[in-house]
Image (tube, rainbow, N blue to C red):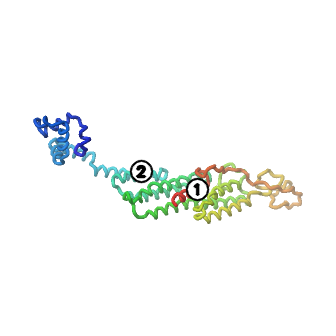
Amino acid sequence: AASHMQLSNFNKFDMTYIDKIGHEEIGKFKWKKLTREQKYDAVYKVVSDPDQYKERLAASNFDKFLSTLDYFIGGDTSQKALIGKQLDVAMKKLSQTTNIAGSLLGIYDKCKAINKPTAPLKDKFWSLFAKCYDSACASFSNDPACIDKLDRPMKEVLEYSKGLHKKLHDTSSSGISSGKGEDAKRITNTMKGMIKMQCDVILKKKDLWANLSHTCQNPCPPKTLAWNTMSPRDWTAIIHSILLMVHNKHFHENFSKEIVDLQWALQIIGTFSFVKVCAACNNGDCKCKCHKCRKQLDRCSCGNNHKNKRLKVTLCNDTVQIQVPDNLDKPNHWGHLAWNFCQFMDSNN
């Protein structure tokens, strides 16, 4: 509206409109005597006067038009209420499969624009994150090939810490003054929990694998990647990938138990790397039998007084299925979560 415009901008109006208002407000006789600058100044004062502004609106019935427009379209208050409802709907539509932290950050900015409370956004993030995390954990626990799915919840919590978390607790912009330290601790503990979960799954699956290998029920060589078909070389690659961060102070300060357990697991895995196989057997067979009586051997003699060929030592499963990426920043690297945690801690300490 012209009533809210600076004089410098008002002077850019076409002279035709200035003349029309001037003739009506100042009078034709006086108007002719004014210079161009005086004419603009005189009309600007008229339209800038609130009383004059309201009077002219009433005289032209424009005030009734504005009231009607406000009823159908909505004024400032109605528009804010409408946008607020739209944001509520957008919040409800969010799921664990969407970009949780990014979407909520966009909603936060819109809430701030209409002075809508932003505190509920924190609970919404953690609620959706829990579902995202549980889904990734279930996939990983069922299938080691899903190691890259753990990257999604890790990225979500990292993005939250850099964006929405900081804005929610930014007191300089009327953020949530309380709970910042508690929320920051929750972020750190969540990241730690992800790595502990990863290590716990690996150690439990290793025990299952070791038992199957000991009872010779594990098929050799494996055709598909599964927890119970991985070779000792695969298990060694997995555990060493996580232990690549062992020299980072934040890693050994927070995961001392996991480090000890993983290192011990390497020792156990080493005992299953080789089995004694009868020379008459095919290379890599799990079950070894005497070449004469075909009885399964668990010692150097078959027990039937048959002359047994010398046993040879062969890898029980030399198939390599786990390919270690060159860089720890790859989601399918088994040390990716630990690397992310250490990067986060290094940048925040």
User: Where, by quadrant of the figure, is residue 217 drawn?
Assistant: bottom right
Residue 146 badge: none
Q: 315 or 115, which lies in front?
A: 115
**What amino acid is found at the position of numbered circle 1 in the picture?**
Trp
User: Where, by quadrant of the figure, is residue 295 drawn?
Assistant: bottom right
| Comes first in the chain, label 2 or label 1 | 2
Q: Marks 2 and 1: CB-CB under 8 Å?
A: no
Give the farthest residue toward the left.
Answer: 29
Expressed as whole percent of the image width and height from the top left, the position of residue 125 reads 45, 56
Left or right: residue 156 versus residue 252 is: left
In this rendering, the label closer to the viewer, 2 or 1: 1
Q: Is residue 265 above or below residue 283?
A: below
| Residue position marked by numbered label 1 in the rendering | 339
Q: 235 or 179, which lies in front?
A: 179
Expressed as whole percent of the image width and height from the top left, the position of residue 253 reads 59, 65
Q: 9 or 271, which lies in front?
A: 9
Expressed as whole percent of the image width and height from the top left, the position of residue 292 reads 86, 54
**What amino acid is found at the position of numbered circle 2 in the picture?**
Gly
Left or right: residue 162 versus residue 323 is: left
* Mark 2 residue element: helix
Residue 106 badge: 2
Dot 2 surroundings within 10 Å: few (below 14), some, or many (20 or more)?
few
Q: How many marks?
A: 2
Expressed as whole percent of the image width and height from the top left, the position of residue 197 reads 58, 60
* Mark 1 residue element: helix
For the N terminus, the quadrant is top left
